[in-house]
Image: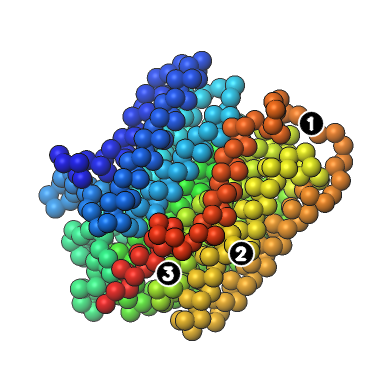
Amino acid sequence: MSWDTALPVLVLLSSLVPGLVIFFLREEQSRVRTALNLAGAVVKIGLVGIMLWGVYHERHYETRLPLLPGLDLILRADALAMLLTTLSAGLWLVTTIFAVGYLEGSPHRSRFFGFFSLCVTATMGIALAHNLLTFFVFYELLTLTTYPLVIHRGTPQALRAGRTYLVYTLAGSAVLLLGIVWLHRVAGPFSFTQGGALSHLGPQSHGTLLVIFALLIAGVGVKAALVPLHGWLPVAMVAPAPVSALLHAVAVVKAGAFGVVRVVYEVFGIRFAADLGVTTPLALLAALTIVYGSLRAVVQDDLKRRLAYSTVSQVSYIALGVATPGSISSIGGIVHLVHQGIMKITLFFCAGNLAETLGIHRVSEMNGVGRRMPWTMVAFTVAALGMIGVPPMAGFISKWYLGVGAVEAGQGWIIAVLAASSALNAAYFLPILHTAWFKHPTGEWKEEHPRGRFEADWRLLLPSLVTAALVIATGLFASTVMSPLTWAKLIAAREYQP
């Protein structure tokens, strides 16, 4: 096996092996567990960095494992895959640091970090999957590895949330599998293909393909939290903050949105999907989700639930971008895979920091907290302004390309959706900032855990500041060679090439 063939597998093994070893560690072996997690994360970043540079220079990395006659498990690093693998590798490192601080002294840490590493492995497999079979295998593995994280605390509320999570995700997987099997019967074996793999099929297949498209989008739409398939996401907020950050920014929700992109671009192809008439309904569904999620977020007092409904809204920018005709809107949707991830993980880090340090879980409890934890709230403020779309934050870049793309495509109604969304973003984020920075504290702060020399445990504070800096940097340096925006332009250009 050559280096180019082995590299995709090594990327998966860099989190799989530490995860399996961690399961066998005793609870008191915290230093060994932390060392394994951090070593795996650093190795993964190095391997992904090598692969990123190679893909940029048109080098091919592919692993093919025969499964059945005509059916192979295929891992391949292409430009689209590298967006999610790079995001996951980078955020796994900072989330590991955050989780070590957050869970210090908690029970069942070996179980938690074992499944945590397996979850990242599954996400990497989804990103690198080069056909629907491989995608489905890792998509299911993601469900099985995130369920123990959702129910980690073992409370009745956590167990109920876990059951809800399984009902939604397993039902979605069944629908997805039906669509994959049916499509295999119609089109035979195929890999993900730039411009779409199905455009060669004749008009006699179009009615069947409409149904298959609906099945595939419904299957991935559960994890992407498209309305009305989103009900599991707010319920799952009973999970620890590192899990919430993982679900929203790196793993489950992002896997669903990534699946939407793969189906539209590389299974059907954007032109063929438009000819079938499926892109407009998808865009309308995404728009409905954007507005609905924002409206629900406005009325939530629980901070994590407000952020959860914000995710329901924000992730659908990705589907809206890929379903809108034209490469410019596609750029906005694709780059939001990364931008939403770094903004949302910052917000959940800050929410976890507030909960773990001061026991704050509700917006109504945040009076004057910016004076007690200024750096945490600076990070929260940066990410919140990014979500609203204030320049030069990452979110502004996404919304700008979505808006310009809508004008280019003559889709004025999308401009109205984006404007309404930004107004609603402001309606549920600005009151938090006003409460935290301008209201007076109602009493003495109750310290949940000792803070040491900093306003909070440095392992909780540092990841928040790092990802907040990324929110600014990806906006300020959007035009640089290896920026997410440049990468999104490369992907869109290839998908729309003649």
Which element is circle 1 on? loop
Indicate left or right for 70 with 31 as reference: left
Q: Residue, x 49% and y 61% (percent of image)? A: 478
Vertical relation: 91 (above or below) 103: below
Q: Name the quarter where the C terminus is drawn.
A: bottom left
- For the residue carrying disc 1, how many other residues have a C-alpha within 10 Å: few (<14), some (14-19), or many (20+)? few
Q: Residue, x 57% and y 39% (percent of image)? A: 463
Viewer-proximal residue, 295 or 485? 485
Kindly identify which numbered label has been placed on residue 446: 1
Q: How is the image coloured?
A: rainbow
CA distance separating discs 3 and 2: 20 Å
First reached walking from the N terminus: tag 3 or tag 1? 3
Where residue 445 appears, x then y in whole percent?
81, 34
Q: Nearer the viewer, mark 2 or mark 1?
A: 2
CA distance separating discs 2 and 1: 36 Å
- For the residue carrying disc 2, how many other residues have a C-alpha within 10 Å: few (<14), some (14-19), or many (20+)? some
Viewer-proximal residue, 3 or 191? 3
Q: Name the quarter where the N terminus is drawn.
A: top left
Q: Nearer the viewer, mark 3 or mark 2?
A: 2
Pointer 2: what residue? 391
Pointer 3: what residue? 330
Where residue 495 appears, x then y in whole percent?
32, 69
First reached walking from the N terminus: tag 3 or tag 2? 3
Q: Residue furthest left?
A: 69
Q: Amino acid at mark 3?
A: Ser
CA distance separating discs 3 and 1: 47 Å
Q: Residue, x 25% and y 57% (percent of image)? A: 58
First reached walking from the N terminus: tag 2 or tag 1? 2
